[in-house]
Amino acid sequence: MYGNSRVTVILPAYNEELHIRKAVDDFFLPGIVDEVIVVDNNSHDRTVEQATGTSARVVAEPEQGYGHALRRGLREATGDLVILAEPDGTFVGRDVLKLLAYSDDFDMVSGTRTTRELIWEQANMGWFLRVGNWAVAKLIQILHDGPSLTDCGCTLRLIHRAALEQIRDEFTVGGSHFLPEMVILALKRKLRVIEVPVNYRGRVGQSKITGTFRGTLATGVRMIGLVVRSRVS
Ligand SMILES: Nc1nc2c(ncn2[C@@H]2O[C@H](COP(=O)(O)OP(=O)(O)OP(=O)(O)O)[C@@H](O)[C@H]2O)c(=O)[nH]1
Ligand SMILES: [Mg+2]
């Protein structure tokens, strides 16, 4: 509980057997986090087996895709404050506290991973990714009249249930460019959005989106297309 609010953490998982248990333990902050949901997205390793032995609730999302997995988690969450995270070791469980602190004043609190002081040495946040994430975030900020935005792809974020209910019927993206759609819908509804710097560490296990230059570029192009299209439509 945070004050009188129940807190849910969602962990989308596609072949994350190596770290899923540790991630659940790390995010289940005693006395604060009430529910952790692991969304298994057709993993063909031992992710489900590993997650089943934890205190998380495991749900299966058959529709493949980062966005589909997160949207399923958002539908399953029962908390008043809903947090998206990842079970790959890149985020730090205690950073949930940073999001919660700002949730007193904002409808949506997104982490940003482009703050140099919080990027760990092993993190996959080299020059290209850092500038790319920053640039697409600035495009969202400018085209959609947003607050200062410095990262378009940080999964770690919080949304109030009441805010989520205003936008969730309008989600359309099931792929890797889901997050910009979430922010743009929030801005269109005039929800109060802010970013806070969070730790970003090296990944455990194999990367599925930004592990290759090709994958990163494809996601970036999809994101820019969405940001521009949703401005003119
Ligand atoms: N790419 C991808 N990720 C999925 C899918 N379903 C669930 N996920 C999870 O979504 C999260 C994001 O994928 P990652 O491979 O970590 O991509 P990333 O965070 O951009 O990059 P790295 O953390 O550096 O690998 C992970 O927790 C995945 O397990 C899917 O179909 N595709
Ligand atoms: Mg990741």
Image: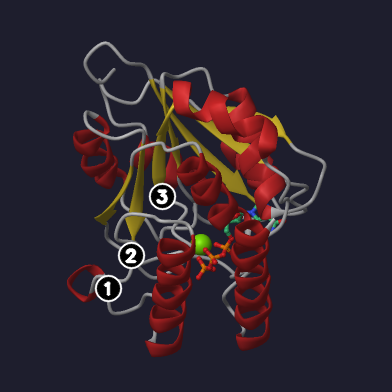
**Front in this rendered view, residue 15 or 197:** 197
Estimate how packed mark 2 is, as few (under 14), some (14 to 19) or many (20 or more) residues with alpha carbons within 10 Å: many
**Front in this rendered view, residue 37 or 153:** 153
Of pointers 2 and 1, the one earlier in the residue sequence:
1
Residue 223 picture location, percent across and down: 61, 67
- Are dots 3 and 1 in contact, CB under 8 Å? no
Measure the C-alpha gap from mark 2 to mark 1. 6 Å
Does residue 53 appear to the left or right of 89 in the view shown? Answer: right
Secondary structure under the numbered disc 2 in the rendered image: loop
Estimate how packed mark 1 is, as few (under 14), some (14 to 19) or many (20 or more) residues with alpha carbons within 10 Å: some
- Are dots 2 and 1 in contact, CB under 8 Å? yes
Secondary structure under the numbered disc 3 in the rendered image: loop
Of pointers 3 and 1, the one earlier in the residue sequence:
1
- Mark 3 or mark 1, which is nearer to you? 3
Q: Work out whether residue 52 can be spotted.
A: no
In the rendered structure, find residue 168 and report the number of the disc placed on it.
none
Which residue position holds label 3?
Answer: 156
Estimate how packed mark 3 is, as few (under 14), some (14 to 19) or many (20 or more) residues with alpha carbons within 10 Å: many
Of pointers 2 and 3, the one earlier in the residue sequence:
3
**Front in this rendered view, residue 62 or 131:** 131
Which residue position holds label 2?
Answer: 200
Q: In which quadrant of the rendered view does residue 130 lie?
A: bottom left
Q: In which quadrant of the rendered view does residue 53 lie?
A: top right
**Three-letter residue code for mark 3:** Leu
Which residue position holds label 1?
Answer: 120
Measure the C-alpha gap from mark 2 to mark 3. 10 Å
**Three-letter residue code for mark 2:** Tyr
Picture mark count:
3
Secondary structure under the numbered disc 1 in the rendered image: loop
**In the rendered image, the vertical position of residue 144 relative to residue 192, given as above or below:** below
